[in-house]
Structures are given as structure tokens and as C-alpha cells.
Image (tube, rainbow, N blue to C red):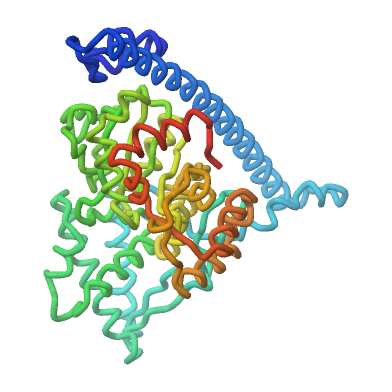
């Protein structure tokens, strides 16, 4: 049993008594210095107990909220079934108002096995063959991923793909090349799935550079194929290169190999692109710290922040990739612990949180498995700039584009539903100031782990 797990059974204040050496208290220090150091150790441990209590309260609140949402969803489904049977009485119309914003016929994909995906590809190939034999040329019906077909569903707090479809026909001169790319991609995917191997998106692109020309072409067709078959993009066995990192109180098995993220060095563990190969997830963490910047992540990893406050620290090093989003969604769902976001105090930091929470438009068809609702905004918030007396030289002027993006965010559903987020955004746009997480280093390189985060967590200062 690891020391982290055994310590977890005792209050943090009790653990502090045996943590003198770990916290840097010198055995040769003068009596007065030693007393001060021990007092500081106990204070930190007492603060940790306060944090644990607040995190557990937050966890209970989020679980209760999720249970209520599940009950409401079940009620909506039952009401829909009643509508189909024409058995709803006229006086129950008000009871069904919630379902009105959930569009009919939305495209939601499922986790399929390699065999099921192969059958889907072969089924499309047979349909095309039949069209050609009947001398009709060939065409494919594909769910539209246009912006006009991306719909935000408040009840689910995520973006979904609507029911509009487009026809891609080989006989149309403007679409013949795209049709050829689609068939070529399906051919390559079939070969990969038969061998039960994984390849990267870059690998796929380089198999036929002259046809694809630009990787954006082959990447886009991957999403088209996934929606046609009704599977997740990861089910196609095509992945992006490693980008995300995780460190802290979590253990799991990756393709049979045991992984302990408290023993992966200061850099932590790269989040694998093959999320389906992760099994037996275990953790004694009380919360997940989702960090925008790699620099802030490295500070927490090197300072072993997760030992003082039992947590899991995750970063995608900027814009979140699919593997990191899927990993976060999965461990949050399995561990049932809150997620606290730490991003730059600018519009793009909020945009990054929105991708984790509500999904991205280009992959809205797979939003159910890629989104983590109810992320709490811990920092760096616009109100923190004054609260923590951030020096003027660390407060950057927002550009016209920044201000425009900020105002656009104020019209987004995920902002409008949270008045506290809206208030922070109003402060940002009004003051026209932004700041990066690294600005906290102006108080000292370890200020973020020794002062800022402990105070934030102790006060429960998340929204």
C-alpha cells in the first residue's frame, strides 16, 4: 500500500506529525526556527483538512445535481414514449416543456468494436457497389457537420449534431475528389481494423499525400466516416499524437501494464491516445485540477502538490486534444469527483474550459463521451487581479480581437447560464485587462503552489 493511500485514512493534521522531514524542517535548526517550521506544517495540514471538507461538500452537491438531471432525463424519455402512443392528455402539455429544446433525430455515436466498425465500412461499400451495378454512379449520405447543424442542448449542457444531411456524389464534378478521398480513407481504415492496430492521423495522411494534399482533408473525412458508421473517432483506430499529461493520485492499467501517476517523475504520465486500453482506474483523490498551461502543471508536479492536497493534475498544454478530453470525461465519470479549472484570465482561457465542458463543434457527434459538465472555475479569474494585488506590469492590455471575443462569449449559453461567470467576464471586458497564470510567479516561483492555490482551496473560492 502506498504512503499516499495509507495517509488518506488519517486526517491531514495527524499526517503532519510524521511529515517533518518531507516538509523541509531541519533537524539541526535552532529551537525557535524549528517551532515555527512545525507550526507552519500543522497549519498547512489543518488547511488541507478544510479543503478536504469543502471538496467533499462540492462532490455531494454535484452528485445530487447529476442524479436530479438523470431523473429529469428519464421523465422526458417517458413523456416522449407517451407522445408516440398518442396517450398524453391535453392538460399535461406544461409537464413536457423541457423536452422541446431537445431536437429530434440528432446524431449521437456509440462505442463500437473493431468488428462492428468493419461491418459498417463493408455495408457502405456494398451499397456503393449496388449503385454502380445499377448504373447510377454512386453517392453517400453523410450527416452535415456545418455550423448551422450544431445545436446546444441546455438539458445536456453540451453541443450535439443535428439531423441535417448532405449527399456526396461522385458524378458531381465539385464533389468527385471529396468522394474519392472518402473511399480511400475507408479503404485504409479497413486495412487498419483488420490488423487490429492503431495509427496516427499523420500516418494516414502520408499514405496518399498526392490525393489528400492537406491533412485537414483526411482529418475531416475521418469525422464523416465516423458519423456514417455511428462510431466514435477512436473506434476507427486513428489517433492523434500524445499531448496531454497527468500526475497525482491515480492508478490504472494501460494495456495490462500497471501505472501509478505518483511515481512517474516530475513530468508525470503522457495521456495515451488509446483510452480504450485503460482499465481498472483507482484513486483516493478528492478533486481534479485541470490546468491550461504546461508551465503551471510542471510547478505542481515538481512541488508534489498532490501530496499536500489529494488531487489529480491534468493538462493538455493549451487547446485540449481528443485524448485528454476523453480521459478527463472518463475518470470524472468513474471517480465521481469535482473538476477545478485553472486557466489564463483571458477569453481564450474560458474558451478552453468551454471545450472541456460543452464540446467542440467539429466533434459534436461524439460530445457525450468527450465532455465534462460542471467544471468549476478556480482561477485565474479577472477578480483575482485585484484580490491578489497582481502587479500592473503583469496585467496585459486586451487587444481589440480579445475584447471582441470576450463580448461574443457573453452571448454563449454556457456563460449565460452561470451569472458568476458572466460577472467575471464583464470585469474582464470593462477593465480591458488580461493576465496569464505565470503572472503569479511575480510573487515567487512557488507562490502558485504555496499561497495562491492553498488559499483558493481553503476558501472554496470556485464558481
Quarter containing the N terminus:
top left
Res 258 → quadrant: top left
Q: Estimate the x, y position of residue 438 in percent, counting from the top left.
A: 33, 50
Judge whether 152 appears above or below 273 on screen: below
Please count the marks in the image.
0
Can see residue 180?
yes
In the image, 373 versus 182, the foreground residue is 373
Q: Nearer the viewer, residue 52 or 433?
A: 433
Q: Residue 299 at x, y = what percent?
A: 26, 39
The quadrant where residue 254 appears: top left
Residue name at image x 44 percent, y 49 percent: 390
Closer to the camera in the image, 129 or 247: 247
Quadrant that contains the C terminus: top right
Q: In the figure, is residue 247 to the left or right of 353? A: left
Residue farthest to the bottom, as pictured: 173
User: What residue is at 56 percent from the left and 51 percent from the top?
Assistant: 157
Residue 330 position in % (x across, y down)? 38, 39
State which quadrant residue 166 falls in.
Answer: bottom left
Residue 107 appears left or right of 127 = right
**Where is residue 101 drawn, in percent x and y?**
66, 58
266 vs 235, nearest the viewer: 266
The correct choice, above or below, for 306 with respect to 126 in the image is above
Q: Residue at x 29, y 80 (%)?
A: 178
Q: Kindly tell me whether residue 109 is visible in this rendering.
A: no
Amino acid at each position: 500500500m502506498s504512503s499516499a493511500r495509507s495517509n488518506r485514512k488519517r486526517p491531514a493534521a495527524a499526517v503532519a506529525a510524521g511529515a517533518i522531514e518531507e516538509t523541509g524542517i531541519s533537524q539541526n535548526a535552532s529551537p525557535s526556527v524549528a517551532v515555527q517550521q512545525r507550526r507552519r506544517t500543522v497549519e498547512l495540514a489543518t488547511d488541507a483538512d478544510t479543503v478536504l471538507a469543502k471538496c467533499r461538500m462540492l462532490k455531494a452537491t454535484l452528485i445530487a445535481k447529476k442524479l436530479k438531471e438523470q431523473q429529469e432525463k428519464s421523465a422526458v424519455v417517458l413523456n416522449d414514449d407517451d407522445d408516440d402512443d398518442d396517450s398524453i392528455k391535453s392538460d399535461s402539455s406544461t409537464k413536457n416543456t423541457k423536452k422541446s429544446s431537445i431536437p429530434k433525430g440528432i446524431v449521437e455515436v456509440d462505442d463500437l468494436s473493431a468488428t462492428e466498425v468493419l461491418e459498417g465500412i463493408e455495408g457502405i461499400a456494398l451499397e456503393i457497389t449496388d449503385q454502380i451495378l445499377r448504373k447510377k454512379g454512386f453517392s453517400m449520405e453523410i450527416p452535415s457537420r456545418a455550423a448551422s447543424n450544431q445545436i446546444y442542448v441546455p438539458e445536456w449542457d453540451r453541443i450535439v449534431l443535428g439531423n441535417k444531411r448532405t449527399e456526396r456524389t461522385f458524378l458531381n464534378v465539385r464533389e468527385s475528389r471529396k468522394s474519392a478521398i472518402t473511399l480511400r480513407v475507408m479503404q485504409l481504415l479497413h486495412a487498419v481494423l483488420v490488423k487490429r492496430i492503431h495509427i496516427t492521423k499523420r500516418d494516414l495522411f502520408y499514405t496518399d499525400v498526392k490525393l489528400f494534399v492537406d491533412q485537414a482533408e483526411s482529418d475531416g473525412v475521418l469525422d464523416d466516416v465516423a458519423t456514417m458508421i455511428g462510431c466514435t473517432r477512436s473506434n476507427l483506430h486513428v489517433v492523434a499524437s500524445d499531448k496531454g499529461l497527468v500526475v497525482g493520485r491515480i492508478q490504472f492499467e494501460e494495456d495490462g501494464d500497471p501505472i501509478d501517476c505518483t511515481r512517474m517523475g516530475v513530468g508525470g504520465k503522457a495521456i495515451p491516445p488509446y483510452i480504450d486500453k485503460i482499465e481498472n482506474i483507482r484513486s483516493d483523490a478528492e478533486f481534479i485540477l485541470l490546468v491550461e498551461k504546461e508551465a503551471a502543471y510542471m510547478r505542481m508536479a515538481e512541488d508534489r502538490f498532490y501530496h499536500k492536497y489529494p488531487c489529480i493534475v491534468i493538462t493538455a498544454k493549451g487547446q485540449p486534444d481528443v485524448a485528454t478530453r476523453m480521459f478527463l470525461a472518463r475518470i470524472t465519470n468513474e471517480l465521481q469527483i469535482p473538476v477545478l479549472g485553472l486557466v489564463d484570465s483571458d477569453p481564450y482561457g474560458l474558451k478552453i474550459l468551454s471545450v472541456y465542458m460543452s464540446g467542440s463543434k467539429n466533434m459534436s457527434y461524439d460530445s457525450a463521451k468527450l465532455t465534462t459538465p460542471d467544471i468549476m472555475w478556480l482561477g485565474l479569474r479577472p477578480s483575482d487581479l485585484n484580490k491578489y494585488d497582481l502587479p500592473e506590469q503583469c496585467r496585459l492590455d486586451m487587444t481589440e480581437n480579445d475584447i471582441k471575443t470576450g463580448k461574443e462569449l457573453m452571448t454563449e449559453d454556457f456563460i449565460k447560464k452561470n451569472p458568476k461567470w458572466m460577472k467575471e467576464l464583464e470585469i474582464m471586458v470593462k477593465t480591458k485587462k488580461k493576465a496569464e497564470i505565470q503572472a503569479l510567479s511575480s510573487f515567487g516561483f512557488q507562490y502558485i503552489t504555496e499561497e495562491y492555490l492553498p488559499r483558493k482551496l481553503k476558501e472554496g473560492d470556485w464558481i
